[in-house]
Image (cartoon, rainbow, N blue to C red):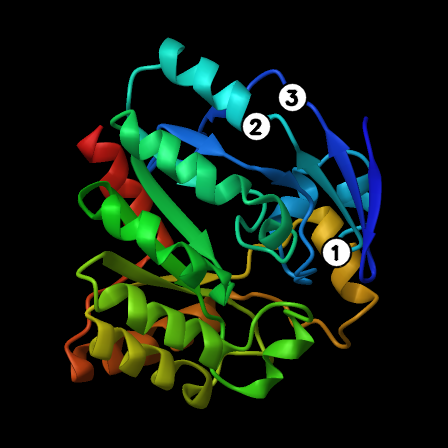
Amino acid sequence: MNNIIKLGNTIVREIRVKTALSRSGLPEYDYALNPYLGCQHGCVYCYAMDFTKGEPGIKWGEVVYVKVNLIQALLRDIRRFKPGIVGVSTITDPYQPVESRYKLTRRAIEVLCNAGYHVSIQTKSALIIRDLDVINKCSKSIDVGFTITTMRNTYRIIEPMAAHPMARASALRKIASLGIETWIFLGPLIPGINDKVEDYESVIRLAKETNSQVIIDRFRPRSVVIKFMSRRLSPIYPVTRDWWIKTLNSIMKICRDYGVNCITAEDEWEASRKMR
């Protein structure tokens, strides 16, 4: 490891890596690119906790590792790998606050687009607006998704350090206005937290306004996440089949009423598998 930096309440450790791209286990992507390990947003439900080893996973939201030589590693990788779809990012937010200092995501997008890769970005941050120039240049080979779990201020319960949903909505509108393919990840839906009509109807209205697809997903409990959540949320209600059917039916009805293309995460995964 190299330098150790304190940014606000976050400990940032600079590390060096041998590779930037990894084969993705998600059917919609060929590769994953994660410029950082750990995430300053500290979302209590994030599955990445179960897949992030060492200090950034144990001290979720408090410690972030920065892959300072990511771009050099990426330049080597693109000479070895066949162009495909790259998910940016799959176990961290590519536009968490530390990106404003290191600009690894911005530079990686430029490299990937110039090398003939398709870039698929998912974020909870309005910082992405900084890179509108790069995104616009890559408009034919890029799509951008925003995770929005609710449009209400109660989002702080589960996403303590993420951008306000209204800021994400504003960023989405700006990107969509450029003709970029956009989508909203409405999830995870958590019983008793963000599963009411007032949580998701406004998200679907935003999707209608921006011509964005909506991908819907439920909370999928994992061991590390449940332990983390239990220290911050009480009570934690079970994710039951009946609850999910009722919630999903309500969301799908609103999607039909607004004429928005809404699919479940399972449907997206299955469609991606069939296209491979």
Q: What secondary structure is marked by label 3?
A: loop
Could you tell whether 29 is left or right of 70 in the image?
left
Task: Say which mark, if any, is on residue 61.
Answer: 1
Label 2 neighbourhood size at 10 Å, few (<14), some (14-19), many (20+)?
many
Identify the amino acid type marked 3. Val
Label 1 neighbourhood size at 10 Å, few (<14), some (14-19), many (20+)?
many
User: Considering depth in this image, is 225 or 59 the residue closer to the camera?
Assistant: 59
> Residue at (59%, 50%) from the top-left corner?
99
* Spatial separation of the CA atoms under disc 2 and disc 3: 7 Å
Could you tell whether 205 is left or right of 200 in the image?
left
**What residue does disc 3 label?**
17
Q: What secondary structure is marked by label 1?
A: loop
Q: Is residue 25 above or below residue 129?
A: above
The answer to which image quadrant residue 183 occupies is: bottom left
Identify the amino acid type marked 2. Leu
Q: What secondary structure is marked by label 2?
A: helix
Rendering coords of residue 262 (x, y %): 25, 66
